[in-house]
Image (tube, grey):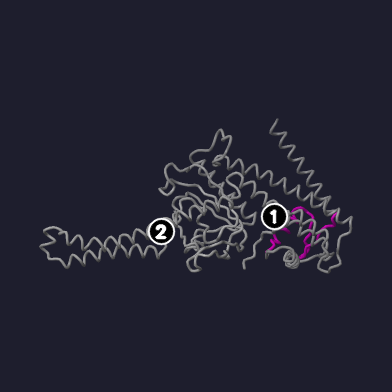
Amino acid sequence: MLREHFIPIRVADLVGYLCTESGPMHNQTLSADEQSAFRKFARVVTLHVHAVYLAELRQLKDSYAAFDPDADPKPLDPPTGDARVKALDALFETFVHLMTRANYIRLTRDEMEQIMEGASDWGVDMDVAWDAFDKVEVFYRGKGIGKRILRSWRWLWRKRELDVPTFSRVVVMFKQRPHKRLGENPDTQTVFLKLFKDIPQVDIEMLLPGGRIRMPKMERMKLGGSVLSSIGYVAWKLSNFPLLSILGGFTSGMLLALWTPLALIAGYGYSTWYSFQSSRQTYTLQLTQSLYYQNLDNNGGVLFRLLDEAEEQEIREVLLAYFFLWRYGGERGWTAAELDFYIELDLKKRVPAEVNFEIIDALNKLLRAGIVEKIDDRYRALPIDAAQEKLDISWERYVRVNEQELAAEVG
């Protein structure tokens, strides 16, 4: 099973259980003063990370404004020509980077086609018009098992609950180009963002516009068989009539001999086609109703959600890495592998997921903040009072720099 970097626990819950944690030796609980100090430390870390992400949110909003279909008000001077092309490329690059930080996994087109291959248990297979997009990106986070209800002739049309592999979160970002699948006058100027939850893996193609439901192979064989049977039957019947009769025109006997079987075959073919059309309409209705509840956000709202997820993830990583070094690493400290092992072991007890903790990323952040020291291949945390002082000094410097930049802009 693929382990993901995402840590599925709220920051408030994380701080709460760390304060009551007994540690690897089961006798290393925090005193009341230590709990108070760590909660204060966690609040300051949260403020630091939030300030960084708030600045990024403003930049991303400005980058997306020219391509946001819901922008209100619209930008007064949106980029045009080559500048717009460069701005579009930069927007997609920035978004891909954001998704990585929020611990989403990017799906390539080959991976998408492999996932979408074949039909679901509902007998539906869709064809994606990839050439309907100038740019398209698809990301997911979390794999799980969902429940779906299905009726089938195999079970005498009784309801049956099936286990369906799902993606917990799916994000789609795309810019369209003119294409017959998109209908008349499609929006080809803006960039659409969509966020969904609990999407069946095999049906991920339904999230892209311009998809077309394909007739199942069995149905195509039935319909093709009806056509070929009709042609073959007519040819066989005509071969039994004298050539002069055929050249002279169809007699009433010939028409009667051909009409009845042809009508039966044509009726069977129509029945097959109509059954497929009914199935397609039913599936389309079910799809619309399902996505109504599975759609979490659209366009600009997706940016806010994803930046919030990336911010929370970064806070979790920093708090976990510092806490375990501070409480359990001791004077000698731990190697990155040792720290990674104990954090993942602890998370395995806490959350219903196999987490692949990004230890190097977390340690680099702590080193840059100056609250962890590296000696040879071992890492050691500063005492929490010293770490708090480092963060306070860093925060004062951050505020001072921002005040100077604001004064320069106003001046």
Q: Position of residue 28 (x, y in %)?
A: 86, 65
- In the rendered structure, find residue 169 and report the number of the disc placed on it: none
Image point 14% across, 61% down: which residue?
Answer: 246
Mark 1 or 2, closer to the camera: 2
Please tell me which residue lies in front, 335 or 190: 190
Q: Position of residue 355 (x, y in %)?
A: 68, 63
Asked if 312 appears above or below 5 in the picture, the reply is: above
Query: How busy is the neighbourhood of tag 2: few (under 14 within 10 Å), some, or many (20 plus)?
Result: few
Please tell me which residue lies in front, 295 or 101: 295
Disc on the earlier residue, 1 or 2? 2
Image point 58% across, 65% down: which residue?
Answer: 163
Q: Type of residue at label 2?
A: Ser
Q: How many numbered badges does the structure rendering display? A: 2
Q: Which residue is mark 2?
A: 275
Q: Please indicate whether residue 208 sits to the left or right of residue 52 in the image.
A: left
Q: Quadrant of the C terminus?
A: top right
Asked if 266 appears above or below 57 in the picture, the reply is: below
Image point 40% across, 64% down: which residue?
Answer: 217
Asked if disc 1 and disc 2 are in contact, CB closer than 8 Å, the reply is no
Q: Position of residue 50 (x, y in %)?
A: 72, 47
Q: Position of residue 198 (x, y in %)?
A: 60, 57
Q: Which residues are magenta?
A: 356-384
Image point 55% across, 65% down: which residue?
Answer: 160
Q: Please indicate whether residue 387 sits to the left or right of residue 163 in the image.
A: right
Q: Type of residue at label 1?
A: Gln
For numbered disc 2, what is the local secondary structure? Answer: helix
Q: Quadrant of the N terminus?
A: bottom right
**Spatial distance from mark 1 to mark 2, Cα to Cα?**
49 Å
Q: Which residue is mark 1?
A: 313
